[in-house]
Image (spheres, rainbow, N blue to C red):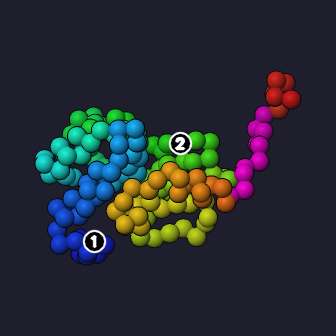
Amino acid sequence: MRFERTNFSSIKEHNQTILSYLKGLTKTDRLFFLGDFGELSDEEAKQFKDFKFYKIMIMGNHDKESREYYMERYGFDEVYYVSYWYSKRILLSHEPIVVDKGVVNVHGHLHNSYLSLKNYLNVNVFVTEYKPMHLKQITNLLSALEKPTRIVFLKEWYAL
């Protein structure tokens, strides 16, 4: 709270701000949470769990509980210890991961810092002003990147 969340008077105000932005999501939406979830009070955990949108979590370095804990307490539908390929050109991860030039790595972890590479997108809550980022913003970034060339690792008879 003292270093990065100075615009909030308490962790409760911080959490309620984030939860209020999530109220705009509908049951057809999917929320990918890219790690370092933290701990919510029982009341906040129930509020988060009661949201009807689909919740997917990629665990971060500060997420110490089991997958089952996050699913039970917070209602995550899926929880992963590793990165998640959303599509062939979008990799979701907690920490930045090396990707090819035609791929976007959407990540958190860096707080209010950025990589100076155009195919990395930090979506930490500090950067997004505590609001969820829409997929359209990510696909707009993709359209600015050159498409990756087809890489053939093996020359198999059926691939010729």
Q: Residue at x 40, y 51 (%)?
A: 34
Q: Nearer the viewer, residue 53 or 76?
A: 53
Residue 24 position (above or below residue 9): above
Could you say where residue 57 lies in the image, as x and y percent from the top left? 37, 44
Q: Nearer the viewer, residue 65 or 122?
A: 122
Q: Residues within 10 Å of mark 1 (few under 14, many from 20)?
A: few
Could you say where residue 26 lies in the image, as x and y percent from the top left? 35, 43
Residue 124 found in image quarter: bottom left
Q: Which residues are magenta?
A: 145-154
Q: Which residue is mark 1?
A: 5
Q: Which mark is residue 129?
A: none
User: What amino acid type should be assigned to the residue bearing mark 2?
Assistant: Tyr
Could you say where residue 77 lies in the image, as x and y percent from the top left? 34, 35
Q: Is residue 48 visible?
A: yes
Q: Residue at x 77, y 43 (%)?
A: 150
User: What amino acid type should be assigned to the residue bearing mark 1?
Assistant: Arg
Q: Which residue is mark 2?
A: 86
Q: Is residue 98 visible?
A: no
Q: Is residue 153 magenta?
A: yes
Which of disc 2 and disc 1 is earlier in sequence? Answer: 1
Instruction: State the predominant SS element of the stretch in magenta.
Output: loop
